[in-house]
Amino acid sequence: MTTIIDGKALGQKIRSNIAGEVTLLKEKLGRKPGLSVVLVGDDAASQVYVNMKEKACIEAGFNSSIYRLGSNTTTDELLNLIDDLNKNDNIDGILVQLPLPEQIDEKKVLYKIDPSKDVDGFHPVNVGLLNIGEDTLFPCTPYGVMKIFEEYNIELSGKNAVVIGRSNIVGKPMAALLLKANATVTICHSRTKDIPALCRNADIIVAAVGIPKFVTADFVKDGAVVIDVGINRLEGKLVGDVDYDGIFDKCSYITPVPGGVGPMTIAMLMYNTLKSFKVRNNLL
Ligand code: NAD
């Protein structure tokens, strides 16, 4: 029996719980969590993501401020805006939508964000804290995957987990979170030899490659849990990094695309913003 993981329902549940908590906290503290999202330029996909984030903020009862800056914005202009947001006590979370236009020094910008407001979890301070096993603001997509494991009671301790992909946004933090949960973790990437053989030894496979149907039936041992982070467009349809139909019968659990990991990312952004708000108000 294969269980299809319903990330849409779980993401919605997390967001509803957050909205309920925000109502109570607002009564108690007279303030609600605030998230600022900065979008530079006119990348179509980024605009869609930012609109989704704004909608999620409104639903959660957060204050949201969206800064839409022109595509010729300079690094200094962006650094000044982040400085203002860092100093603003009504802002608990700051997110700079990636990718940034070429002329902007992305590292400088991300490193300027106050780590306590870094709801994307990309600042080196938060990356470092995660890697020494501390609790901090974790990157939303891999953190969403961890929430899936928790919700579905998927045991991680002592399990063999293979993460395919080593990006700073998904692969590396995913591996660090799995390690923190006592899994034995292998990270595969574009130079790894014989990925199918490494995956066949895995109880859990997380695919974050960006190649449609990369994970096929010969990667998967019977009963494995397969998490598909990939979002790719193929012949006008959204597909993941996993050959869903080809591996379905071999898995114990599988995430669909869409409706698996995707909805968890925004839910965890809301979760991180609320967490930052609570820390700021000495509630955590
Ligand atoms: P990325 O391009 O930054 O990283 C891809 C990784 O895959 C790299 O580390 C690379 O080494 C590895 N890789 C590339 N080709 C490979 C190969 N042939 N064999 C083995 N490894 C290979 O991408 P990313 O930002 O980590 O995203 C990965 C996928 O996840 C994309 O499809 C992206 O759209 C999706 N994504 C989804 C969400 C979500 O919310 N569900 C969030 C972020 C990214």
Image (spheres, rainbow, N blue to C red):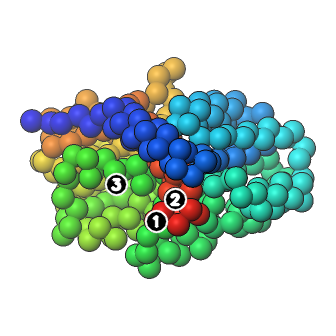
- For residue 146, the mark is 3
Q: In which quarter of the image is residue 5?
A: top left
275 and 263: which one is in front? 275
Q: In this view, does 27 lie above or below 105?
A: above
What's the residue at 79%, 47% (across, down)?
101
Evaluate if marks 1 and 2 touch, with contact meaning CB atoms under 8 Å apart: yes
In this picture, residue 145 sits left or right of residue 154: right
Ligand 1 within 8 Å, label 1 CB: no
Mark 1 closeness class: few <14, some 14–19, many ≥20 residues within 10 Å: few
Q: Distance between the residues labelled 1 and 3?
A: 20 Å
The residue wearing badge 2 is 278
Q: What element carries label 1?
A: loop
Three-letter amino acid code of the residue under disc 3: Met
Q: Quadrant of residue 164?
A: bottom left
In this picture, residue 276 sits left or right of residue 252: right
Evaluate if marks 3 and 2 touch, with contact meaning CB atoms under 8 Å apart: no
- For residue 284, the mark is 1
What's the residue at 82%, 58% (across, down)?
84
Q: Is mark 3 on a helix, strand or loop?
A: helix
Three-letter amino acid code of the residue under disc 1: Leu
Q: Position of residue 57 (x, y in %)?
A: 58, 37
Q: Is mark 2 on a helix, strand or loop?
A: helix
Considering the image in quadrants, where does the N terminus appear?
top left
Q: In which quarter of the image is residue 253?
A: top left
For marks 1 and 3, the one nearer the N-term is 3
What's the residue at 47%, 44% (across, down)?
24
Q: Where is residue 175 in the image (x, y as percent from the top left)?
A: 39, 64
For marks 3 and 2, the one nearer the N-term is 3
